[in-house]
Amino acid sequence: MRPGNTESKLMNIATRAALTLLTALASAFVCKDTLAEAPPPAGSHTVLGPNALLANGSLALLNRQWEKGIQLTLMGLEAVVSSNDRAAGYANLCAGYIALKQYQHAIENCDRSIGIDDTNWRAWQNRAAANLSLGRIEDSMRDIERGLAINPDAPALQETLAIAREREKLQRQQLRALVES
C-alpha cells in the first residue's frame, strides 16, 4: 500500500468516525425531547448542545467545512463550558485538523481532550490516525489499544489497526532489507 493512499485512508476513517457521531447527535439535537430521553452513548462525545458556537462548529465539521468548524469550535471553547463539552470540543478540533492534514495540531487537541476525559474512544482513534500519518507507528498502536479497551467493536479502530499493522510490517521489511544490504 502506498503511503499517500494509506494517509488518505486514515483521514477518511477518522472523518467517517467523527461524521457518524456528529450525524447521530445532530438528529438528536433537532429532536431535543429525544435527546433528553436518550443521551449519546458513553465513550462517544461531541458537542451539540447549549453552547451555540461549539454546536455550530460541530455542524460545520459535519458538513466538511473544516476551517469554519475549527474556528467556531475555538471560539466556543473560549466561553465557560462543562468539562465534557470542553473534551468533546477538543476531540472535534482533532478531527478537523486531521481532515486538513495538520497532524501535529490534531495531536495537541486530542491530548487536551484525553487529558480531560480519557474515556472517549474517538479521541484515541483520531490521535492514532494522526500519529500514524506522522509515521509514529508505536504511538499509534498504543492509542488504538486504549481506544479498543473502551470500544472493542469500533470499525474505525479496527480499520486503523489493520493499517498500522501493515505499516509495521512494511517497516520491518525495509529494516531487514537495509540490514541485509
Image (tube, grey):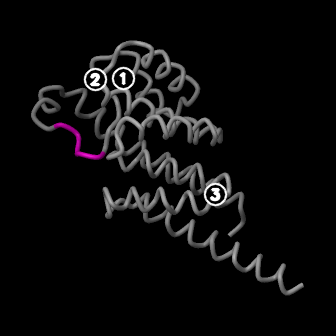
Q: Give the range drawn in magenta.
A: 39-43
Q: Residue at x 64, y 61 (%)?
A: 6
30, 140: nearer the viewer: 140
User: What is the magenta segment's predominant secondary structure?
Assistant: loop
Dot 2 or dot 3, earlier in sequence: 2
**Percent position of residue 77, x then y:** 43, 19
Dot 3 or dot 1, earlier in sequence: 1
User: For numbered disc 3, what is the local secondary structure?
Assistant: loop
CA–CA distance in space, label 2 to label 3: 35 Å
Contact between marks 1 and 2 (CB within 8 A): the answer is yes
- Tag of residue 11: none
Q: Quadrant of residue 178?
A: bottom right
**Percent position of residue 131, x then y:** 59, 52
- Tag of residue 49: 2
56, 81: nearer the viewer: 81
Q: Is residue 67 above or below residue 52?
A: below
User: For numbered disc 2, what is the local secondary structure?
Assistant: loop
**Percent position of residue 31, x then y:** 18, 28
Q: What residue type is labelled 2?
A: Gly
